[in-house]
Image (spheres, rainbow, N blue to C red):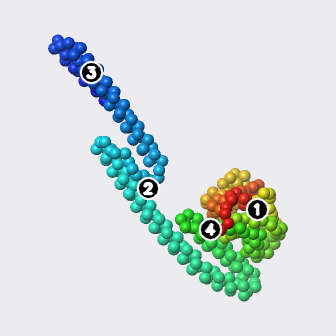
C-alpha cells in the first residue's frame, strides 16, 4: 500500500511536469495524504497485532475448544474461517466415530474375556481332579492362557476414559503373597527357590492394578530363570520393592527399550510366544498409580526389577 501511494504521487508529479504545471502543487497534498496515511497505518498495525495475538491464543488450544475468531475484514478471511469451521466439524465427527468404535471394541472384548473365563475355570477344575504329568503340563499352559486373557483386558482398559482405580492404603506383603501363590506351581515345576522376607510396608495404591504389575514381573522372572535358579523379593530404602532373579538376563542393547510397546528384544525373539506387552503395561500402570519401575540386568547374571512405591502422595479414600 505504501509503494502504491508513492507510485500515484510519482504519476501526478510526472503529469504535472509534462503539462508545465508547478510540481509543488503535487508535493503539498502528497505530504498531507502521507501524514493521514501514517495515522491509518498505525491504526491498522494495532488492529492486526490484536488479531495476531488472538490467533496465537487459538493456535495453542485443541481444535474442539477453538472459538471466538477475530472479525473478518475481507471475503478471503471469511472463506478461511468457514474452512476452519468445517474442518473442526469433520474432526469432531471423526472423533465421535472413533470413540464409538473404541467403546464397541471394549464392550466386545470385555464380554469375550468374561465368556472365556468360564471354560478356563471348568478346565482348571478338571485338571485339579487329575494328578499326572500331562495334567500338570496342561494346567501350566492353561495358567498362561489365563494370563494372556487378563493382559488383553488390562491393555484395553488402560486408555479407557473410565477407570476403576480405588486408592487406599494396602499392605505390600499381602499383595506379594497373592502373586507368589499364583505362581507356586511354576516354582515347583521348575524347582526354583524363592527368597522372601516380609517387607512390612504399607503403600497408598490400587491393589488390583499393582498386583497385576507384580504378577507380570514374577512371570518374567519365572519364565527366564532356568531350573534350579532363585528368585528374590526384598525391599530397598526408602520404599523400593525389588524382584531379583538368576536368569538369562537382558542384553545391554535391549535394556533401554524393554518398556517400549511391542519390543521383545533378543530373549523375546528366541521365545516366539513373547508379545512385548508385559513390561509396557507395567510401566503404563505404574505411571498412572504414581509409582516408578526400572530394570537393571546383564547377560547370564540375572535381572533386577525395581518398583518405587513412594513417588506420589495421595489421599486415602
Numbered badge on residue 241: 1
Q: Residues within 10 Å of mark 2 (few under 14, many from 20)?
A: few
Is residue 70 positioned above or below 304 on the image? above
Mark 3 secondary-structure assignment: helix
Q: Is residue 220 left or right of residue 284?
A: right
Question: Mark 3 or 1 closer to N-term?
Answer: 3
Distance from disc 4 to disc 2, alpha carbons, whole Å, reads: 28 Å
In what quadrant of the picture does the N terminus appear?
Answer: top left
Number of numbered discs overlaid on the protein picture: 4
Question: Which mark is nearer the camera, 2 or 1?
Answer: 2
Q: Which residue is mark 3?
A: 30
Question: Which mark is nearer the camera, 3 or 1?
Answer: 3
Q: Position of residue 129 (x, y in %)?
A: 72, 87
Q: Which residue is mark 4?
A: 165
Q: Is residue 39 left or right of residue 25?
A: right
Distance from disc 4 to disc 3, alpha carbons, whole Å, reads: 75 Å
Q: Position of residue 184 (x, y in %)?
A: 77, 75
Amino acid at each position: 500500500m505504501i509503494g502504491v501511494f508513492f507510485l500515484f504521487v510519482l504519476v501526478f508529479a510526472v503529469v504535472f511536469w509534462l503539462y508545465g504545471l508547478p510540481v509543488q502543487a503535487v508535493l503539498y497534498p502528497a505530504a498531507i495524504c502521507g501524514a493521514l496515511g501514517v495515522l491509518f497505518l498505525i491504526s491498522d498495525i494495532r488492529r492486526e497485532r490484536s488479531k495476531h495475538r488472538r490467533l496465537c491464543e487459538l493456535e495453542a488450544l485443541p481444535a474442539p475448544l477453538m472459538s471466538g475468531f477475530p472479525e473478518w475484514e475481507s471475503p478471503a478471511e471469511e472463506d478461511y474461517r468457514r474452512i476452519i469451521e468445517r474442518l473442526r466439524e469433520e474432526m469432531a465427527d471423526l472423533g465421535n466415530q472413533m470413540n464409538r468404535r473404541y467403546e464397541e471394541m471394549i464392550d466386545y472384548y470385555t464380554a469375550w474375556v468374561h465368556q472365556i473365563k468360564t471354560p478356563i475355570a471348568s478346565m482348571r477344575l478338571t485338571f485339579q481332579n487329575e494328578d499326572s504329568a500331562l495334567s500338570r503340563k496342561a494346567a501350566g499352559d492353561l495358567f498362561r492362557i489365563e494370563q494372556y486373557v487378563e493382559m488383553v483386558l488390562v491393555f484395553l482398559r488402560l486408555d479407557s476414559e473410565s477407570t476403576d482405580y480405588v486408592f487406599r492404603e494396602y499392605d505390600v506383603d499381602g499383595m506379594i503373597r497373592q502373586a507368589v501363590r499364583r505362581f507356586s506351581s511354576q516354582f515347583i515345576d521348575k524347582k526354583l527357590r524363592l527368597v522372601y522376607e516380609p517387607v512390612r510396608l504399607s503403600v497408598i495404591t490400587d491393589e488390583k492394578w499393582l498386583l497385576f504389575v507384580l504378577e507380570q514381573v514374577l512371570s518374567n522372572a519365572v519364565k527366564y530363570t532356568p531350573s534350579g535358579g532363585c528368585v528374590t523379593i526384598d525391599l530397598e530404602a526408602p520404599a523400593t520393592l525389588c524382584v531379583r532373579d538368576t536368569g538369562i538376563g537382558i542384553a545391554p542393547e535391549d535394556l533401554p527399550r524393554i518398556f517400549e510397546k511391542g519390543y521383545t528384544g533378543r530373549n523375546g525373539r528366541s521365545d516366539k510366544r513373547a508379545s512385548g506387552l508385559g513390561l509396557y503395561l507395567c510401566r503404563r500402570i505404574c505411571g498412572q498409580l504414581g509409582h516408578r519401575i526400572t530394570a537393571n540386568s546383564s547377560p547370564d547374571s540375572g535381572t533386577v526389577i525395581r518398583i518405587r512405591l513412594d513417588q506420589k502422595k495421595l489421599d486415602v479414600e
